[in-house]
Amino acid sequence: MESSDFKPETGCLSIIVLGASGDLAKKKTFPALFHLHRQGFLESDVLHIFGYARSKMSDNEMRDRLRGYLTPCQGCEVLREEDVSKFMELIKYVSGSYDAEEGFLLLDKEISAVEDSTEGSSRRLFYFALPPSVYPPVCKMIKSFCMSKSDKGGWTRIVVEKPFGRDLDSAEALSTQIGELFDESQIYRIDHYLGKELVQNLLVLRFANRLFLPLWNHENISNVQIVFKEDFGTEGRGGYFNQYGIIRDILQNHLLQVLCLVAMEKPVSLKPEHIRDAKVKVLQSILPINDEEVVIGQYEGYKDDPTVPKDSNTPTFATMVLRIHNERWEGVPFILKAGKSLNSKKAEIRVQFKDVPGDIFKSKKLGRNEFVIRLQPSEAIYLKLTVKEPGLEMKTALSELDLSYRQRYQDVVIPEAYERLILDTIRGDQQHFVRRDELKVAWEIFTPYLHKIDKNEVHSVPYKPGSRGPVEADKLAEKVGYVQTHGYVWIPPTLAKVSK
Ligand SMILES: NC(=O)C1=CN([C@@H]2O[C@H](COP(=O)(O)OP(=O)(O)OC[C@H]3O[C@@H](n4cnc5c(N)ncnc54)[C@H](OP(=O)(O)O)[C@@H]3O)[C@@H](O)[C@H]2O)C=CC1
Ligand SMILES: O=C1O[C@H](COP(=O)(O)O)[C@@H](O)[C@H](O)[C@H]1O
């Protein structure tokens, strides 16, 4: 956890972005590498970046493609040409297919050439910005031709993106294929939500504050909502999205990972294996999903995308109640909600407490205590609570303890999730990556319901773009115990009147 735990390694660092011509590479991977380099986390004298893909192009053509996607680092006003040029100089491009040895032999030759001219060990990080269908052949090629040279010391690591399978069987088959070639310590399954600042804060909030320890259980908490909303549709990704749907895209990975951190027991230590053990344990305690506690929806107009079949049942919205069968959480619904083309864009965790027993202030009518962790946008942590309204009357009002990051940490740059996670892969810290057994349980939870969707046994309810999603979803949340607060008004501190 402390940066002093990190011992820098020396030697050549080669970062190989496989699928370099694709969307993820240009939108996320290369910009993250650029920011890390610009901020001095990746040193130019040992760093070499290789793009690898099937398209034929020169180094310069590759660089030109990326240029438009590089943005100023947070905290920098403008993109400095000097920074861009320094970064571009580090990039080389190798073209080849994903299942034939020529390309990988050439790639190895290029990497070896730069390693031979650098003192120290050989560190090779392969970033799979690729469709999962080619993971197995690519792993075979790397294993056969591109491993770090043992005589130099160092390591070979692979970073794999979701979707990691479509269901339990396909994910397990993929894990087995990759597991035969690479050790678990070499595999980094990325879930970029684990790199978000407020997700990383969850363990600190929960376990470094005495305040929450006695409250964090079914005695005090009525329900927990973990919400992801986007105010745009699948624009241009309909063909891809339709094969997966919102449950595979968001709930099975991002929201479930957040749930783990909210619900898990205190890990033995902050060692990655201890944290991941605690996550697996809570996942194993999740009960099978009850069809009555699910609402799936599809926004109207989704099927207008020519790449989406006219009879698609793929959900673009889902509310699912997960129940954790253990001493801490018995009876507390964890309401996972995610949707595209909704009325707002946000991701948050909302922990709603039970009503006060023996309430003498009639505070129930104002609303319950809620502890909200807004992951994005405008990161914030706030606690909604009942207070006496200032004045001569004994009147109560709903107010908040508010930790808005923009206010509190004005000069602090919050790193992008991908930057943080890529840095972790280089440092060899697997804490924020998904372990194989975690992934397996995650699929076990969702697969039965996903198969029902695939077989059209359950149906997506239509909803209007720009709405809150199907009304049935709000009804479900209410049915399982969520009580909506009415009349709470938050006054952003910057707009508050300053007393004279
Ligand atoms: N530091 C900060 O930035 C702070 C900001 N605020 C702001 O104050 C405002 C109010 O805060 P808060 O009460 O926490 O948040 P909201 O009023 O946005 O939402 C509260 C809850 O009510 C749900 N909800 C909203 N409309 C309906 C509906 N018609 N039926 C059922 N459920 C509904 C929301 O669901 P859903 O999420 O699905 O919309 C959410 O779970 C927000 O804009 C918030 O961002 C407050 C405190 C601090
Ligand atoms: O993984 C995914 O996440 C994005 C949303 O990421 P965020 O960091 O902007 O919240 C989502 O749009 C995409 O569908 C999904 O594949």
Image (cartoon, rainbow, N blue to C red):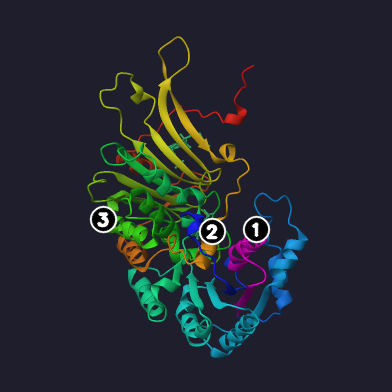
Q: Amino acid at mark 1?
A: Gln
Which numbered disc, 1 or 2, marks the residue that appears first in the sequence?
1
Residue 267 position within the rendered picture, expressed as x and y whole percent measured from the top left: 33, 54
Q: Amino acid at mark 3?
A: Ser
Cβ–Cβ under 8 Å for marks 2 and 3 = no
Which mark lies nearer to you, 1 or 3? 1
Residue 319 position within the rendered picture, expressed as x and y whole percent measured from the top left: 38, 50
Q: Quadrant of residue 186?
A: bottom left
Residue 39, disc? 1
Mark 2: give few (<14), some (14-19) or many (20+) Cα within 10 Å: some
Q: Which residue is mark 2?
A: 420
Q: Nearer the viewer, residue 168 or 101?
A: 101
> Cα distance, mark 1 to mark 3?
42 Å
Residue furthest top as drawn: 392
Q: Which residue is mark 3?
A: 285
Height in image: 97 above or below 464? below
> Cα distance, mark 2 to mark 3?
30 Å
Mark 3: give few (<14), some (14-19) or many (20+) Cα within 10 Å: some
Q: Which residues are magenta?
A: 25-53
Q: Amino acid at mark 2?
A: Arg
The residue tagged with tag 3: helix, strand or loop? loop
Q: Under 8 Å from ligand 2: the CB of mark 1?
A: no
**Could you tell me which residue is drawn at 47 percent across and 59 percent down?**
5
Q: Quadrant of the C terminus?
A: top right
Q: Nearer the viewer, residue 6 or 48?
A: 6
